[in-house]
Amino acid sequence: MKKHEPKYLKDYRPPAYWIDTIDLQFDLYEKEVIVTSFMKIQRNNEQAGEHTPLVLNCQDADILHVVAGDMVLLPGEYERGEDYFKLNRVPEQFTLEIKNRLTPQNNTSLEGLYKSSGTFCTQCEAEGFRKITCFSDRPDVMSRFSCIITADENKYPVLLSNGNLVKKGKLENNRHYVKWEDPFKKPSYLFALVAGDLVCIKDTFTTCSGREIDLHIYVEAENKDKCGHAMASLKQSMAWDEQRFGREYDLDLYQIVAVNDFNMGAMENKGLNVFNSKYVLARPETATDQDFMNIQGVIGHEYFHNWTGNRVTLQNWFQLSLKEGLTVFRDQEFTADLNSRAVKRISDVKNLRTLQFPEDAGPMSHPVRPESYIEMNNFYTMTVYEKGAEVIRMIHEILGREIFRKGMDLYFHRFDGRAVTTEDFIQTMEDAAGVDLSRFRLWYSQSGTPRVTVRRTYNEKRRQLTIKIAQTTPPDHNQQQKKALHIPIKFGLLDKNGKDITPPEHHLLELKSLEKEWVFDDIPSETVPSLFRGFSAPVIMDTDLTCEELSFLMAHDNDAFNRWDAAQQLYFREIDTLISGLQSHATPTVSSHVINALEKALKDPHMDRALMAKTITLPDENEIGEKYEIIDVDAIHSARQFLRQSIAKELEGLFMEIIDSGSAVDPKDLSHNAMAHRSLVNAALSYVAALESPQSQEIIYQHFISSGNMTREIFSLTLLCDMTSPFTGPALEQFYEKWHTDPLVMDKWFSVQAGATVPGTLDKIKSLCRHPDFTWKNPNRIRSLIGVFGMTNPFVFHQADGAGYQFFADKVIDLDKINPQITARMVSVFNRYKRYDARRRELMKNQLKRIHDVRGLSRDVYEIVSRALG
Ligand code: 0A1
Ligand code: ZN
């Protein structure tokens, strides 16, 4: 099938024609939209000659009229393929006008022009613009855009596009029009249009050079009171990018629109960001502390794209990480600078380990700069985004903050207004810093997570410590032979009192070969090394540290990330022992050093509460599963539950004290301290819930009723859903009654039920699919029910009879007809079928085959499923 053929990086050629300007007009009606596009086209003489045809991308557009120069072309005079428009002979320079018809009300893919709750909106990245009109829809064709929109004035009072509003007025039949002009050249993926009945929240920001920028956030009228945090976050982002990276905003207006139906988090269209409403709307009553943090992060992310992505853009889609890895790094730093750096790092690393490491070890593994793709939308991955950000972070680590900044300045200076590559970025960093990053480049081209082994020897007589570090990366379908990467290892050495005695020249060890030894002189005995501080490289580390040494690091390491990580390693070891015990039917017991270490942490008066919460939280079942070649879902669930219960029994008194202290915190307070306190209370509540006693159920229910904010309310509801309790049903009903008119809160109601591990969960999920508030048209709702079930509930999804697999595959097959992009993400849960026992493996494989054989399967799902089976 032709439509399923891959595209390769090695085949990249610059475009044959440039499109210098495009003037668009959208006439919006209820049953159709008429798009008129007027382009100035210019041959690229370095690539093309007079016989080179002009080929434009064109998908789903019903062409009505074509004029080339002053000649009207009849259908036989141009070629129209399923996904292209072609003119065989064209002059070196000419104008082309194309009129076409669209039916956005039928567009459920949420790419191109579509309708969300009555609002017209667009999503053009990666290749959605071709669903709007015929164009050279590739990021290296940068054009100046203007956009006229006409529509019914009552239904669509707000008409928006990129850049500046230059004209507006009234038309006949109750219609009105606007004209927008974007002074900056941009690729088509950054075009946006919005038309709807929305209210506008206004503010301003004065830039470092004294320019006043208008800031507008558009939402549905009922959400007017939920935009304060998003607006504050936008202003923080603008100030931060000036201070940390010297980047000033360039237009006079910055617009954000929140829509309910959106495939991803948000989109950085020039001057007109379109957001999933989940990342804009928040009040403490409706959004959790985590939601507030996410909003700040995503607002920052889209804003930072204005320089890393928009002003400097991509030569082709293989370079996606050039903008995404770099912008994720920037948003992570923004969050870290404004909140707790350690807490941010811990969450990012947890995310990387639970989602990116498995991706990189499975059939979808690809380098940060992929070499081929069938459907570009499938490459908005954890690898491109999160591992891509880790790669930037390592450069930052190697160069140091100041030189890195110098490199960034040079990057913007060199490439402003151009479409470039990850190689251009690295080269610029080398030039600015005067370093050789030739081996470092492999992080962009080699897939897989490196494993790093650390072994120590100590020579008592010579007072010499030797640390030997070795790396290997397992072979995969991308490369059979993996090369040694350049790995920065942030290093520390603690003496027996916990004092850091690291020789200054060894704060950063750089491993550039398969193995290397470092010899440290004049070192006392009984030191404990702390490696990969702050998780300085995205690797899996295998150390020879004992449990006592880990407990010591947990208490003394001056790197907060490693203190947390030491606790995690202790838990993993404990769970591993419990799993082996369960598998050999031994009576399980929990070792005292885990309880002691936890008790010490809980009694530490200096520890920040948010860090304490992270420290006492056990790794989740997916994270634990990652440690095993063959994942025993049942043993993992039981071992984790047993550990949780044992800790709860031993330390109940301390947990109760924490819970009681929570009542002193104002539920509407969004300061770091208040949020930190709530996260600790929730972590303690989770242990108390594990006691499964009538009293503990009562405590959770009381917490639910008296919550006063969504953080407390939804967390206690989650715990109630995960237990067999007389309180669960009433709590779910009360929550529904209270919140059924708020879609974002209802998503949470679906999620807590989909994530439960109690008997009967699968049947519950099946019946929730038939609930009047469930819809297959809204990605947030699908993710909250089907996504949570498949991705975060391994115990139920992998139930031994395969009923979870069967149900999930049925839904995938149906959903693919509505929204392929979302479906492709969902179906990826089967990617790791080889990691389970023979029976489950067979059951999953059968579902994959069933999906693969569906006629008319989308390119998106086809690519994932065929890779999984391949
Ligand atoms: N560039 C956006 C994410 C995004 C990507 C693809 C989309 O549709 C296929 C939509 C949004 C970001 O990184 O925020
Ligand atoms: Zn992005």
Image: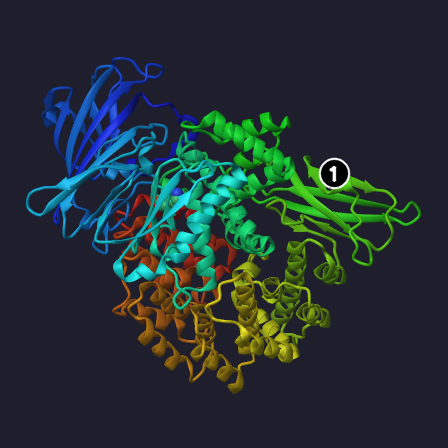
Q: Is residue 784 above or below residue 586?
A: above
Q: Eyeballing the image, is 710 above or below 301?
A: below
Is residue 649 in view?
A: no
Quick check: 834 left or right of 495?
Answer: left
Provide residue 626's location: percent of width, then percent of height: 56, 56
Q: Can see residue 384?
A: yes
Task: Tell me: residue 584, above or below residue 850.
Answer: below
Dividing the picture into quarters, in which one does residue 9 lie?
A: top left
Is 478 situated above or below 301?
above
Residue depicted at x 14% and y 49%: 153
Residue drawn at the location 33% of the way across and 53% of the way down: 851
Left-right relation of 262 to 388: left
Residue bearing the label numbered 1: 516
Q: Quadrant of the C terminus?
A: top left
Q: Nearer the viewer, residue 6 or 250?
A: 250
Where residue 420 appears, x then y in whole percent? Answer: 44, 28
Q: Quadrant of ligand 1?
A: top left
Where the N terminus falls, by quadrant? top left
Pick the residue in front: 360 or 246. Answer: 246
Residue at 55% across, 53% down: 353
- The outermost residue toward the left is 173
For label 1, count other residues whose C-alpha is less than 10 Å away and answer few (under 14), some (14-19) or many (20+). few
Type of residue at label 1?
Lys
Rendered location of residue 769, percent (x, y): 30, 67
How are the colours assigned in the image? rainbow
User: From this viewpoint, which residue is outermost toward the bottom?
Assistant: 694
Looking at the picture, tell me which residue is in the foreground, 495 or 412.
412
Most extreme residue toward the right, as rendered? 461
